Amino acid sequence: MIVFFSSFIQSYRNSMSQGKDSVDTKVDDDSEYEEDEEDDYDDYYNNSDDALSDDNDQDDVGDKGDVSENNNVKKKVHDLEYFQYTCMTLEEVDKKLDQDCAVVADNLKVSKSVAAVILQSHKWQVTAILQSATNQKDRLKILTKSGVQDSVPAAQSKVKISSKMECGVCFDVQPKHKLERLPCGHAYCKDCWLTHTEYTVKSGMPDGIQCMAKECRLRCPKDFAVKFLSSKPEVLQKFNKLLLDLYIGAHYQLRFCIGADCQMVMYAEVPKARQVECKSCRSVFCFECGNNYHSPSNCDTITKWLTKCRDDSETANYICANTKSCPQCHICIEKNGGCNHITCWKCKYDFCWMCLRDWRSHGNSYYSCSTYLENPLIAEQSHEDRAREALKKYLFYFERWENHDRSLQLEEEARKKIMVQIEEKVNRNEGTWIDWQYLLRAGELLAKCRLTLKNTYPLAYYASQGAEKELFEYQQAQLELEIEELSWKLERAGSYQRGDIENQMDVAGKRRQTLLAHFLRD
């Protein structure tokens, strides 16, 4: 296994080195499949309409089975990352939900308000509900499970029905037609229902409005609650908003945008853990879990990692300072850019910010500063030693995760400066706007690759030791190497030809595609 793995790595490294040396060989970046950036990246890689047509013709041939290995990797990444979704307003969502309610209400012979409660309890899976309600017995099971009908009908329950009844809350005896009740038969006066519904709404209505009887879990349909809240418009307005929030939160195909004060909702026919972008506030997040997009880590992994980071962040922040000493002259250096290739301003020593080793050693073999070396004897050591080793491992991955996050922020500022520089060059007649677009595309690709690299560290932290993890860390290291090379050239774009930067973009894009093709799970 070790011999096979070593030979595989060597052949893989040789093939990627050949791809890097060839400037003329271009493979479209995976971002061509993103709707908003498709035209930009097609133009960048093809540079002409004719080339674009030729490339599309080649893709058509490839769809028939005759495709290169690089195109196969690109197609696999596209199939894994491509995600069809729609940004909807609250009005559009409300209309869609009303249509679903009408379908269920017609099939189950209930009101639309009751249908909404049923749908909410079943995550708005209309097809599943309709397939389950094949007969009257199944229909009653659905109504009972959804909390709109009691398992014991009101006529057979212990609640006594007479011409006059006592309110179960205030104990006033009133004619029964003045009392309101759900199908469970628990009757209360209108004033008590108003107080109950108003208080529940003002408390945030986390689970809707339920019957006031102890241990009764029947839910109030919308039309039942509106009867009491219609006299208080402000409370009614808040009730409608909270109810819509509950509906959307329970819907398996809908997700609220995570942007601050954004009212957009994402809709996906087939929900997946994929990236979505709000067309209103431009927030980007994972559709499934609502966190920042975290490919290739899955939702469970990133959730565990973020929880751990919150618990241990103060320890990590205390140990991981923003300044380090130059390994050669020991002068204090502050990192002010996204690139991890640091040149000491005093002695001009080139080193890696993460491992503080000579930068020249990073291009020959494994990018060793991205691989954590486990202690093989840790299981035999004391509890204190194991705890210390666990913290050391966590800090190793956290520091790299945090460093790439800071690099993303710094490089975002750098892209803004590039925009200003391009405008100045165009105003000085040093080329047209189109001539300098490759710098912006390089910045966008760098951000995409670095985000992927950042999200590899939680996956590596929780991965078990073995050949698969070794392959993952190798591809992770190669991606990191090319990212830092691209970052270095982009920060010093004036010292490099356009072809050098474009070639580096091509190589970095391939590295990302290869890693995702192997380790991104559907």
Image: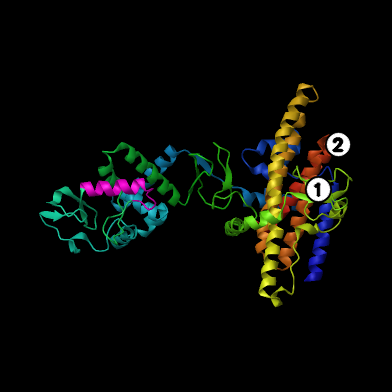
Residue located farthest toward the left when viewing the structure as drawn: 163
10 Å crowding of disc 1: few (<14), some (14-19), many (20+): few
**Disc marking residue 213:** none
How did the renderer colour the structure?
rainbow
State which region is magenta.
190-208
Q: Which amino acid does label 2 sit on?
A: Ser
Q: Position of residue 338 (x, y in %)?
A: 74, 44
Q: In this view, does 126 lie to the left or right of 434?
A: left
Query: Does 328 sit above or below residue 10?
Result: above
Which label sits in the foreground, 1 or 2? 1
Q: Read off the residue under disc 2.
A: 495
Callout count: 2
Residue located farthest toward the bottom when viewing the structure as drawn: 380
Q: Position of residue 394 (x, y in %)?
A: 68, 61
Viewer-closest of 43 and 176: 176
Q: Where is residue 3 in the image (x, y as percent from the top left)?
A: 82, 70
Q: How far apart are marks 1 and 2 (CA)?
A: 27 Å
Viewer-closest of 496 and 100: 496
Residue located farthest toward the top when viewing the structure as drawn: 428
Which quadrant of the figure has residue 456?
A: bottom right
Task: Name the dominant secondary structure of the magenta segment.
Answer: helix
Q: Read off the residue under disc 1.
A: 332
Query: Disc 1 on helix, strand or loop?
Result: strand
Query: Does 101 sit above or below residue 134?
Result: above
Q: Which amino acid does label 1 sit on?
A: Cys
For residue 9, say whether it is visible. yes
Q: Where is residue 62 in the image (x, y as percent from the top left)?
A: 70, 48
Q: In this view, does 160 lie to the left or right of 459?
A: left
Q: Is residue 104 left or right of residue 411?
A: left
Q: Which residue is rendered at x = 76% and y = 57% of the image?
A: 370
Viewer-closest of 37 and 28: 37
